[in-house]
Amino acid sequence: FLSGHLSSQREVHGLSLQTQNRKNHTLLRPNMHDFIKLEGVFQGDPLLVLVNWYTFAPGELLEHPQVQSRMLLWSVHGRGQVWVNGEQHFLEADDYLLLPWRHRVKYQADSLEPFRVGGIHLIPHQASGETLIYSAAHRTDDALAQLNSRQDALWPGLEGLILGSMRDSPRLRWLCGYLIEWASSVPPLEQTRRALARMLIEELQQSRLNRTLGQIRIP
């Protein structure tokens, strides 16, 4: 920074920020070492297990009592409502939800403009050396729900239920579409699916970080 200006640090969602005060405005710059630390910071060995497109009929209602995954769900077009663990959310084109581990979910499409959605299911930690099944349990009595090799893991900045918009991150929209098309058309390849799961987590973290930086206002 130029000499003669007051600089300070702030913490925003775990990110150290340098601020520089001038007469009429304040500059905000993230420290580059924080971006380096953020990239790829998450626990576990994730695996991409299930993807799909689904076009709802007008007013269609679907419900799953317990889904053992962290699912990225977004509306490609149209609109509808999604209840996650009893909490209601309205989705329109490009809105997305990152659902928590072992979530209860209910969908209801709009009666006039039913949504078409994309879904990507990740297992936050899938132990290596196990026989892999590329699916996700949707009920408590599903055999996959009993596997100790599948566990939740910490993804900093992505804890709990996350709401966002693909409009804020065209790169995320492109990646999600690519993942569904790729995983729907090629044989299961464990190491590739693990690499793509990590890429998606990192892209979600970056999207959240960009949104946070864009919303910061310093008085």
Image: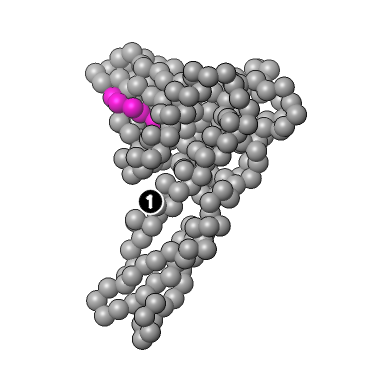
Q: Residue furthest bottom?
A: 4
Query: Any magenta on residue 82?
Result: no
Q: Position of residue 111 (x, y in %)?
A: 27, 17
Q: Position of residue 171 (x, y in %)?
A: 38, 40
Q: Which residue is mark 1?
A: 211
Is 75 one of the magenta-colored residues?
A: yes
Which residue is depicted at the point 44% across and 76% down? 8
Res. 28 visible in picture: yes
211 versus 218 height, above or below:
above
Residue plotted at (49% across, 18% down): 185
- Tell me if residue 198 comes above or below residue 136 in the rendering: below
Q: Residue at x 33, y 27 (%)?
A: 76
Q: Is residue 198 above or below residue 8?
A: above
Residue range of the region highlighted in magenta in the rendering: 73-78
Q: Is residue 69 left or right of residue 130?
A: left
Q: Quadrant of the N terminus?
A: bottom left
Q: Is residue 85 visible?
A: no
- In this view, the residue in front, 30 or 56, is 30
- The rendered magenta stretch, by its main secondary structure, is classed as strand
Residue 10, percent from left and from top:
46, 69
Q: Position of residue 194 (x, y in %)?
A: 60, 33
Q: How many marks?
A: 1
Q: Nearer the viewer, residue 23 or 146?
A: 23
| Of residues 123 and 181, the one drawn nearer to the viewer in this rendering | 181
How busy is the neighbourhood of tag 1: few (under 14 within 10 Å), some, or many (20 plus)? Answer: some
Q: Is residue 107 above or below residue 21?
A: above
Determine which quarter of the picture holds residue 3: bottom left
Pick the quarter of the image with the C terminus: bottom left
